[in-house]
Amino acid sequence: MSELSQAMADLREDDIKAAIKEKCSAGVSGAEILGECQAGLAEVGERFEKGEYFISELMYAGEIMKDIMKDIGPLLGDSAGDAGDKQPVVMGTVKGDIHDIGKDVVTLMLRGAGYAVVDLGVDVPAAKFAEAVEEHNPIMVGMSVFLTTCCKAIEQTVEAIKSTGLRDKLSIMIGGAAASDFVAQRTGCDCYGATAVDAVTLTEGVAGT
Ligand code: B12
């Protein structure tokens, strides 16, 4: 584990910020810095599972990550602002799940790549995804899912999208701690992405850009 990932895992905020500052000055890419933070947060999650960390540590980890996104965000290419000029993409975290950091990073990177992202937020009901599909006619719908208990919500969202009659006109991708290729297949999605970079690559594949 890198020094930055280790500092993140240990929730040493000053060391995390110092390491990021150093990496930024050395010209390390935003995606690489993000990857190291993500690895550290995965370890935070594992310590939580083992009972070494509690909900307060999870919350603190989330706060630290949100704070450092202010520095890393611009490095991830958020140049397009709120609406790019490429085709629309609908993003949201599924019903029952309130994790938003990963979803926000994906949104940021898709916007940076020029896509007009409609961000539905967190805890998004299946019907709201379907309404957004009807309204915006996206080429891609991205769902973030972090809790395994919320996998059912993916299936329900796919069903709701099918009921609009537009399922064949778009692709559906999933990502987040509870997502995988297996979950994507089982829930009727087209693909899974492990990182925000994957989200952009998958969308570019569909858009043909
Ligand atoms: C921080 C955190 C929290 C914070 C969230 C703060 C916030 N504003 O988001 C708080 C404290 C609120 C929280 C709450 C809970 N959490 Co939590 N949390 C985490 C933690 C440690 C980090 C998540 C994170 O922000 N990572 C950083 C970002 C940058 O990375 P990322 O999320 O992986 O996103 C990247 C990729 O996944 C991908 N991606 C994300 N979305 C998408 C979408 C698409 C389409 C694509 C292609 C890619 C993609 O791109 C992103 C950037 O590269 C994870 C551990 C983990 N392994 O994820 C647990 C984790 C997700 N939480 C967990 C749990 C259990 C909970 C709680 C139930 C705890 C509790 N007992 O209350 C609650 C649930 C609340 C709810 N209803 O949603 C578990 C879930 C376990 C499971 N199997 O279901 C995890 C995995 C920890 C663990 N190992 O036990 N949590």
Image: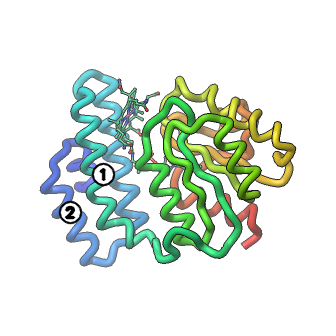
Q: Are marks 1 and 2 in contact (CB under 8 Å)?
A: no
Against 95, residue 3 (above or below) is: below
Query: Which tag is nearer the camera, tag 1 or tag 2?
Result: 1
- On residue 65, which mark appears? 1
**Disc number for residue 19:** 2
| Ligand 1 shown in quarter | top left
Crowd band around label 1 with a 10 angstrom C-alpha radius: few (<14), some (14–19), many (20+): many
Q: Secondary structure at mark 2?
A: helix
Q: Which residue occupies 21% across, 70% down?
A: 22
Residue 128 image offset from top left, x and y in percent: 64, 41
153 and 179: which is toward the camera: 153
Q: Is mark 1 within 8 Å of ligand 1?
A: yes
Which quarter of the picture shows residue 144?
top right
Q: Is residue 85 above or below residue 155?
A: below
Secondary-structure class at tag 1:
helix
Q: Position of residue 191 (x, y in %)?
A: 69, 47
Q: Amino acid at mark 1?
A: Met
Image quarter where the C terminus lies is bottom right
Q: Amino acid at mark 2?
A: Ala
Badge count: 2
Q: Position of residue 157 (x, y in %)?
A: 69, 36
Left or right: 87, with 118 as reference point: right
Name which of mark 1 and mark 2 comes first in the sequence.
2
